[in-house]
Every structure is written in structure tokens, then in C-alpha cells.
Image (cartoon, rainbow, N blue to C red):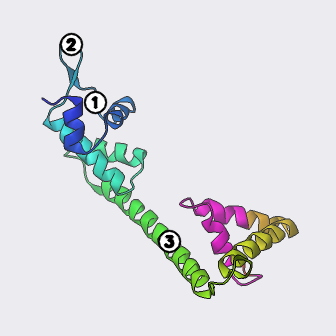
Amino acid sequence: MLTIGTFGKKTGTKVQTNRYCEQIGLMPEPGRTEGGQRRYGNAKLDRLSFIRHARQLGFSLEAIRKLLDLSDEPNRPCHEADVIARRQLKHVEQRIARLEALRTELQRMVLECSGGSASECRVLEVLRDCLTSAAEKANSSPQNSTAIRATHNMLPIWPSFWVLAFCSRPSGHGP
């Protein structure tokens, strides 16, 4: 049986993470010594490793909970796990597409920068123009304002990215 500190070292997690997983029900309450210290066995070690790996793959806590439920019942069909994994793969692919668009926009900005003074800096100019044009478009039409908000809602990684994505399109071509 492992103490919470040793358990954390073996799983690569902090004591607070272990307690949090217990509090939200992903991990069962551990056994305790007569002195009240938590003790963890190999089954709990495996379970927390599962949770940690699932988080590294980007699964939500809700998805992890469902995957753990499936794991706890080995005779159930794995179709649900497959659906959850396919959904996560789709989210990852969408995130990659957004990151690639972000990289392209940043590369374009950097390549167009001549390295002169800040008053002539293409990076700063693009950022200023973009914010101005996005504000003008939002104020000119309720439809454009909705489109800007919708684009922002689709891009949860970096809030500033929606500005770059919106501004990199030719005028008149909404998000």
C-alpha cells in the first residue's frame, strides 16, 4: 500500500490532483490507516494512470467518467468507447486545423515584417488593421457581429486567434 505522496510520485500527479479526482468521483475513496492516512493499492494506481493518460489525450472529465464506467464493466461492448474516442479525434483534428491556420497567419505576418521601426512594423499594422476592421464590420451589421461571435466561440484555444482568422480573409468574405 502506498502513501498519497508515493502514489503521486508513481503516477506523476500532485497530492491535490489525487484528492480532486476523489472529490469528483473519478477515484474511489482510498483505504485509511488507523491514523487516518490514505493508502493506495495497485488498482487505484492503474485507475489514476488511466485518468492521467486520458487527460493527456484531451478527453473531458465527462468522457473520462464514461470511459471509466466502461472499463469497470469489462463485459460491455466497446462501441461507446469507440464513439467517445472518435469524437475526441474529431476535436483534435479541428484543433490542428485551427493551429495550422494560426501558424499560416503568423508566418505571413512575420515574413511581411521588414524589421524597421515600430511605426513601420507590418506585424503591428496587421494587428491594428484587423481590430479596426473587425470592429467596423461588427458595427456595420448585426449579421457580421453574430459571425464574429460565432467564429470566436468555435475557437476556444486562444481568444486572439478569432481576430487573426477573421482578418486574414479578404474583405466581404465572412468567417
Mark 1 and mark 2 lie on one chain; the one further toward the N terminus is: 1
Location of mark 1 (residue): 28
The percent coordinates of residue 4 (x first, y second) are: 23, 30
The percent coordinates of residue 106 (x first, y second) are: 57, 77
Which residue appears at 85% of the width and 66% of the height? 139
Secondary structure under badge 3?
Answer: helix
Which residue appears at 26% of the width and 41% of the height? 48
Which quadrant of the view contains residue 114? bottom right
Image depth: mark 1 or mark 2 in front: 2
Distance Cα–Cα, label 2 vs label 3: 51 Å
Kind of residue at disc 2? Gly
Secondary structure under badge 1?
Answer: loop
Residue 82 in sight here:
yes
Which quadrant of the view contains residue 25? top left
57 or 38: which is nearer to us?
A: 38
Mark 2 and mark 3 lie on one chain; the one further toward the N terminus is: 2
Location of mark 2 (residue): 35
The percent coordinates of residue 7 (x first, y second) are: 20, 36
Sort mark 1 into few (<14), some (14-19) or many (20+) by Cα contacts within 10 Å: few
Q: Are marks 3 and 1 in contact (CB under 8 Å)?
A: no
Give, as a single range, the part of the protein colored magenta.
148-172
Which residue appears at 26% of the width and 54% of the height? 78
Q: Is residue 149 above or below residue 36?
A: below
Q: Is residue 53 above or below residue 20?
A: below
The percent coordinates of residue 138 (x first, y second) are: 81, 66
Kind of residue at disc 3? Leu
Secondary structure under badge 2?
Answer: loop
* 152 drawn magenta: yes
Residue 175 in sight here:
no
Asked if residue 24 lies left or right of residue 70, the reply is right
Location of mark 3 (residue): 99
